[in-house]
Image (cartoon, grey):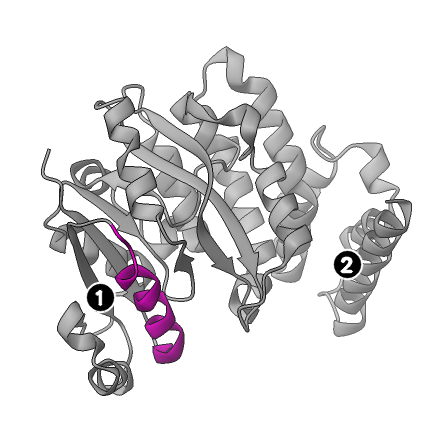
Amino acid sequence: MNPLVSVCIPTCRRPDLLREAIASVLVQAYPKIELVISDDSPDDSTEKALRESGMMESVRYYRNGPPLGQAGNVNHLFDLANGDRLVLLHDDDLLMPGCLEDLAACWDIDPGLTAAFGKHYVISAGGALLDEKSRRLNHDYHRGENDAGQQPALWSALVGQFPNDGYMVLSEAARRTRYRVEPEVGDACDYDFALRLARPDSRFYFIDKYTAKYRLTEASISMGNTVAAESYLLVEGLVLPAELEKTRAARLGAYAPAAINRWLRVGDKRNARRVYFSRYNPLSKRCSPMGIVQGLLLACPTPISKPLTKGIRQARRKLWLNRRNKR
């Protein structure tokens, strides 16, 4: 296998964060790295920032005109990668020191791997480490000591163990799978990619080490309900072996409340009603403060008003406060 690893960073109008992401790659000790940037920015501010910082000499930089969109930008990078393996890194996230060495070493354990990945820290928009959010993220997505090693690929993708970025994957597999465009999967394109990458012959490997930092930005927070709704439909439509049906049910139950909120917000009462009264949204959830508000919105014949959507947010906050006080 060619030892070269292509670190691929799609970017759009975030030159300062991009420079941080690039810096996290340049400090890697792994000896064979190429850094490829695909820029969807409408102006040359990112290009100027890279030249002024002296980073342009360390990267292969491409500015897209016209912009390719999220999926197209990532697929462009997959096509540009010269390494047999690549790492996808979002422009607002960071690699941990030693990340590339640790992930590449997984192929020494199993040369037939498709992808390898580790744990993520969660950081604030300003870069501060958020310990509790980091712990919860890795716990919720089965990234812990007991999950280390090779896991069934489809299970790993389904439960979200396979991360949105910071993973190392065979370039050929990434190009074969590709990202699907927004009209097909919307903002859930990372999750959709993982699910389709997990073919019957795929092998994923998780290492119990922190390999990347995931940054919370306004964009990542605001699209939470959107991703939940699209992820719900993706998981609902999967053809799964019988042993993964319980896992499917758990994922649908986790996505249901936020997905219902999204559909109510955009006026899709058919999907909202269907999931609200499904077994994945049991009576205990329907009787929660948020569930009661959702039920009232479903019963309301008129379009959703701002005061009612505000009620959803207030109910969600009350539920969160109740859970926090119980801990």
Point out the image quarter for the N terminus: top left
Pick the residue in front: 181 or 126. 126
Earlier along the polypeptide chain: callout 2 or callout 1? Answer: 1
Q: Quadrant of the C terminus?
A: top right
Residue topped by disc 1: 37
Residue holding disc 2: 301
Amino acid at circle 2: Pro
Horizontal placement of 61 versus 261: left or right?
Answer: left
Q: Residue at x 10, y 50 (%)?
A: 82
Q: Is residue 60 visible?
A: no
Q: In the image, what residue occupies the spot 68% across and 51% down?
A: 132
Q: Alpha-carbon distance for marks 2 and 1?
A: 49 Å
Dot 1: within a 10 Å radius of its alpha carbon, few (fewer than 14), some, or many (20 or more) residues?
A: many
Q: Position of residue 310 (x, y in %)?
A: 78, 68
Reply above or below: 19 against 123: below
Q: Residue at x 34, y 40 (%)?
A: 102
Q: In the rendering, at what x and y percent does residue 318 appear? A: 86, 57
Rendered position, 16 above or below 205: below
Determine whether 145 is above or below 193 in the image.
above
Q: Magenta residues?
A: 14-29
